[in-house]
Image (tube, helix red, strand yellow):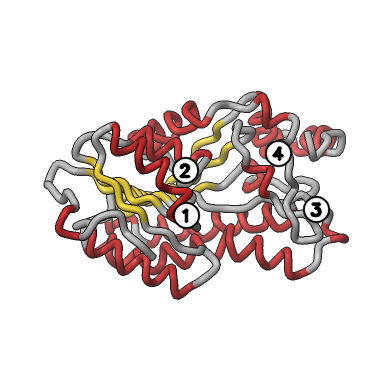
Amino acid sequence: MKLTTPKSQAKNTSNSRNIWITGSSSGIGAALAVYWAAEGTTIILSGLEQKQLEPVALQCEQKGAHVEILPFDLTKEDEIIEAASKIQTLVPKIDILVNCGGIGQRSLIIETPDTVSRKIMEIDFWGHATLTTKILPFMVKTGGGTIAVMSSLSGLFGFPQRSMYCAAKHALHGFFETLRLEHHKDGIKVLMICPGRVKTNFSFGALTSTGGTHGQMDKGQENGVSVEYTAAKIDKAIKRNKKQVLIGKKELIMAYLKRFAPWLFYWIALRIDPNA
């Protein structure tokens, strides 16, 4: 793993904010990095490859932020451990950790082999759970901070062709809500982020039953909210110490129907095109 600058150049002033974002090479993660970039802020960008993170780093630096690039693979525990260790040499504390990396799914349960299912769970749940447990002692020791977790509307209910994706997101809620309760007195805050349709390329990389990628944008995603809007909503939720934030348009009603009128939720869900 390569870093953009040595430790001696990092800005660790008392007024600085230190923000670590996984999955920050594109989409919501990249938008958050640029949104938060400012003079006195240190942004640590993580993703699979340094080359993919460099354009985002440049945008952040142009806004006056100090940027570190820390690539690693969420499916490899040794790289996660190394990243968590490196972070502690770069900043005196982490004010915000955003678990944003992930992968989608577009396949029916009956057609999806275990290898594909396990890969989705490894990235979308275990990667974030492992990363958080490795950096949590440092956050507790240095006075706490906010852990923002990228869930989804699919983390609140099931949906066709998203079985393991939904399972991973549901698991994130259970894990991080427990973490919030266990470490409330340590100053650890947890925000569960549940976007609906956001205009990104996320569906392009979603895994199919063959293990290949979906390779196209879902129809409804083209009309989703912007990543800039999403970043602003996440920032507002963190400032207000929200425990959960739903972001999207009319699709958000499904979360409320599932809770208050489940019969109507199922009636609608059975009539929705999962690729829409």
Question: Where is mark 4, residue-wise?
Answer: 258
* Residue 2, image quadrant: bottom left
Q: CA distance from mark 1 to mark 3?
A: 25 Å
Q: How crowded is the residue under tag 4: few (<14 C-alpha within 10 Å), some, or many (20+)?
A: some
Dot 4: element: helix
The kind of residue on which mark 2 rests is Gly
Judge depth for marks 4 and 2 and give the one in front. 2
Question: Where is mark 2, residue-wise?
Answer: 29
Mark found first going from the N terminus, 4 or 1: 1
The kind of residue on which mark 3 rests is Ser
Question: Where is mark 1, residue-wise?
Answer: 47
Dot 2: element: helix
| CB-based contact (under 8 Å), mark 1 and mark 2 | yes
Judge depth for marks 1 and 3 and give the one in front. 1
Residue 132 x/y as whole percent: 41, 62
Question: Where is mark 3, residue-wise?
Answer: 107
